[in-house]
Amino acid sequence: MKNEVKESGRKIGKILGITLAVYVCIRWLLPLVVPFFIAFLLAKILNPLVGKLEEKLKWKRSVWSTLLVGILFLLLAALLFFFVKTLLEQVVNVADHLEEYKQQAQVFFRDCCGQVEIFTGIQAEAIQNGVERQIPGLMQHVKTNVVPALMNGTISYARSAFILVGICFVVIISTILILKDYGKIRASMERHPIGQMGLKVCRRTYEAGGAYIKAQIIIMIAITSVCVAGLYLSGNKYALLTGCGIGLCDAMPFLGTGTIFVPWALIELLQGRYMLAVIYTIIYTICTLMREIMEPKLIGNKLGMHPLSVIVSIYVGLGIYGLWGFALGPLTYILIREIYLTI
């Protein structure tokens, strides 16, 4: 009995120690080394192609490494430029037509007040007057709190953009250098006991966590594409801007496309635009079915986590890491489990 208690205490102590170490590493060490993790993963993906090209065309490995990494990042930069350009055009368009949308909102509000009067008997004029009395206070709040916060945030966003450019530069150079000597780096890591253990943990974590993250990215891109296409076909001028926003909502664990499409369809229904209400309902249904079908197929049993464990790890991760906990929560759980099974 005493041996069993000691063994249980040892296991609990081991789990707590690993949990603390993983938390410290992810909280403070991961931001410092993440560019090099990305570079190593890119090198791992491109290595077979570089090997084949080097063997067939007899050019130096360093030349092929630089050429392939350069082409890859140029394509990504071109796609990002097109995406940001289109997005900014739609944001500017919204700003240019702000007065028009304000008038449309007022008409919509009056229509809603009329509908409330029909159903409840409360006079529409009384509702409008009550809301209008609150508007000056709301506008003052926006001027004193929201606008200064946005202005301060602009400087922070600009600084973050410069940091991101620097990180991309580090990733590009690191990928080329790692890819150039990938075989030697991998062999030296496999010869060292700590390197062997690290590679084993990383491999198993990559198989499990990589499957989860890759699945979520693929699903988010697929659902965003459906939203953008559906909104574009419905005649929405801001299909890209709105579709991307809805795609991001769907990626959040406690939101989803229904957060946007359900109230949107109800608003269109109240305004008598039945065709748009039907279209938004269809888009919402397609997105929901896509997630339900794609998630099990893409993840399958690779994650090795019960669905409840995924939800709990995401919830705890959001509380500890903030918004990034959506990905870091499951990653923390997987790392703790794999290190426990390895050592």
Image: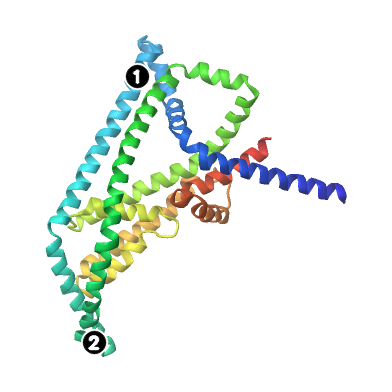
Q: In which quarter of the image is residue 339?
A: top right
Residue occupying image coordinates x 20% and y 75%: 109
Which color scheme is applied?
rainbow
Say whether residue 339 is left or right of residue 96.
right
Element at label 1: helix
Residue occupying image coordinates x 30% and y 55%: 149
Per the image, the residue denoted by label 2 is 118
Q: Quadrant of residue 303?
A: top right
| Residue 333 percent across, percent down from the top left | 58, 46
- Is label 2 in contact with label 1 (beta carbons under 8 Å)? no
In the picture, the quarter occupied by the C terminus is top right
Can you say whether 123 is above or below 193 in the image? below
| Residue 188 percent across, percent down from the top left | 57, 18
Looking at the picture, tell me which residue is in the foreground, 95 or 221. 95
Residue occupying image coordinates x 32% and y 45%: 156
Q: What type is the residue that disc 2 sits on? A: Ile
Element at label 2: helix
User: Label 2: few (<14), some or many (≥20) within 10 Å?
Assistant: few
Q: Point out the residue furthest to the front here.
A: 144
Per the image, the residue denoted by label 1 is 66
Tell me if I can see residue 209 in this picture: yes
Q: Point out the residue furthest to the top here.
A: 58
| Residue 57 percent across, percent down from the top left | 35, 11
Residue occupying image coordinates x 36% and y 56%: 249
Tell me if I can see residue 229 in this picture: no
Sequence order check, earlier mark of 2 and 1 = 1
